Image (cartoon, helix red, strand yellow):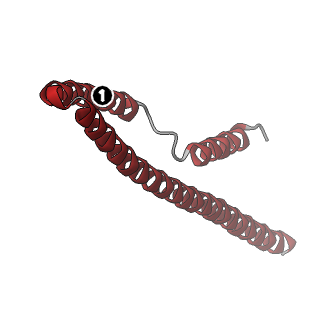
Amino acid sequence: MTQFAGGEEGREGLFTSLKNLVATLLAIGKTRAELLVTELEEEKFRLMSLWAKAIGAAFLLALGVVMFVCCIALAFWEQRVVVFGIFAVLFVGSGFLLVRSLQRQASQPSKMFKASLSELEADMAQLRRYRDRPE
C-alpha cells in the first residue's frame, strides 16, 4: 500500500515538475516576445527620426543648390546655358553616386533583432546543456 501511495506522490511530483517546466518556457517566451516588441518600437522611432531628418535635409539642400545655381547663372549671364549644363552634369553624376551608395547599403544585412536572436541562441544552448547532461 505504501508503494501505491509513493507512486501517487511520484506522479504528483512529475506533474508539478511538468507544470513548472511549461510555466518556465512560457515565461521565457513572453520575455523574448517583449524584447522583440521593444526592439521593433525602438527601430520604428529611429527610422522615423532618420526619415524626417533626411527629408528636411534634402529639401534644404535642394533649395540651397537651386539658389546657388541661379546666382552663378546671374553672375555669368552671357554663358548661362553652359553654367546650367555644367551643373546639370554635376547633379546627375551626384545622383548616380548616391544610387550606387544606396545599393551597397541595401545589400548589407540588417542588424535588426540581433539582441533577440543572441538571447534565443543562449536559451537554446542552455536547454541543450540541460538535456544532454548525465543524470
The residue identified by callout 1 is 94
Quadrant where the N terminus is found in the figure:
bottom right
Furthest toward the left, the residue is 81
| Relative height, residue 75 to residue 44 (above, below) | above
Residue toward you, 127 or 12: 127
**Residue 64 position within the rendered picture, expressed as x and y whole percent measured from the top left:** 37, 44
Q: Return the residue nearer the eye: 7 or 40.
A: 40
User: Which type of secondary structure does the marked residue at label 1 adopt?
Assistant: helix
Residue type at mark 1? Ser
Residue neighbourhood size for the residue with mark 1, other residues' Cα within 10 Å, grouped as few (<14), some (14–19), many (≥20)? few
The picture places residue 135, in percent across and down from the top left corner, at: 79, 41
Residue at (78, 66) in percent of width and height = 10
Q: Is residue 6 above or below residue 92?
A: below
Image: 45 above or below 85: below
- Image location of residue 58, percent across then percent down: 37, 46
**Residue at the extreme right of the image, as rendered:** 2
Q: Quadrant of residue 28?
A: bottom right
Count of number-bearing discs: 1
